[in-house]
Amino acid sequence: MSTTREFTITREFAAPRELVFRAWTDPRHLTRWYGPRGCSTPLESISADVRPGGAWRATMILDATGQEFPTGGFYLEVRPPERLVFTWREPGGDAESVITVELADLGDGRTAMTFHQSGFTTQETWENVQDGWESALERLSEHLAGHTTEEGTGS
């Protein structure tokens, strides 16, 4: 008997749904937020062929040591700007999990995001990955807030 290890994170962003979707699919956005605090993801390490069956990859680098954590996978479903489903390979691991990002337009330039990841092989990985995404999504929120302010579309 195996245990299904999964988690869901919800966030509300002060940014239009189209911008939030681009932040998940455009390397110029991903380089600004992808990875937990203390990690950088260089633009040149990111590629995204955003279509069903298309591959994506990104290498997070631990700022303190330079240790690299390559991640990647394949897009399973792409429905701009509302839904993105893709596989995610653990940094340095062989196991793949599935991430679903659903975006709901709340009006007034706000977006609700539901992030769901399932298919972890160990409890330890599940805990570490969940903590990492919590941190990364805080960075995403900050990136989106700064992006909308710079464009003059923030409130």
Image: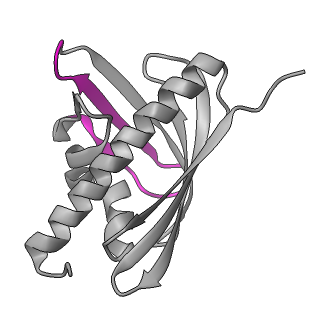
Which residue shows up at 30% across the image and 53% down it?
A: 140
Residue 87 lies, with reference to residue 11, above or below; the image says: above
Measured as percent of width and height from the top left, residue 128 is found at: 49, 24
Number of numbered discs? 0
Magenta run includes residue 10: no
Which residue shows up at 9% across the image and 71% down it?
A: 150
Residue 56 versus residue 144: which sits nearer the camera?
144
Which part of the image, by quadrant, shows the N terminus?
A: top right
Q: Is residue 1 left or right of residue 14?
A: right
Q: Is residue 125 left or right of residue 147?
A: right
Measured as percent of width and height from the top left, residue 105 is found at: 47, 80
Measured as percent of width and height from the top left, residue 11 is found at: 45, 60
Pick out the residue farthest to the right: 1
Structure colour scheme: one colour
Residue 111 versus residue 20: which sits nearer the camera?
111
Query: Which quadrant would residue 45 be assigned to in this image?
Result: top left
Pick out the residue farthest to the bottom: 108
Q: What segment carries the magenta color?
A: 45-65
Magenta run includes residue 54: yes
Query: Which quadrant would residue 117 be assigned to in this image?
Result: top right
Q: Can residue 134 be seen in this view?
A: yes
Which residue shows up at 48% across the image and 69% down it?
A: 112
Which part of the image, by quadrant, shows the C terminus?
A: bottom left
Q: Is residue 82 left or right of residue 21?
A: right
Measured as percent of width and height from the top left, residue 95 is found at: 60, 23
Residue 4 versus residue 21: which sits nearer the camera?
4
Residue 2 lies, with reference to residue 51, above or below; the image says: above
Q: Can residue 118 be seen in this view?
A: no
Which residue shows up at 22% across the image and 56% down it?
A: 143
Residue 37 versus residue 85: which sits nearer the camera?
37
Pick out the residue farthest to the front: 155
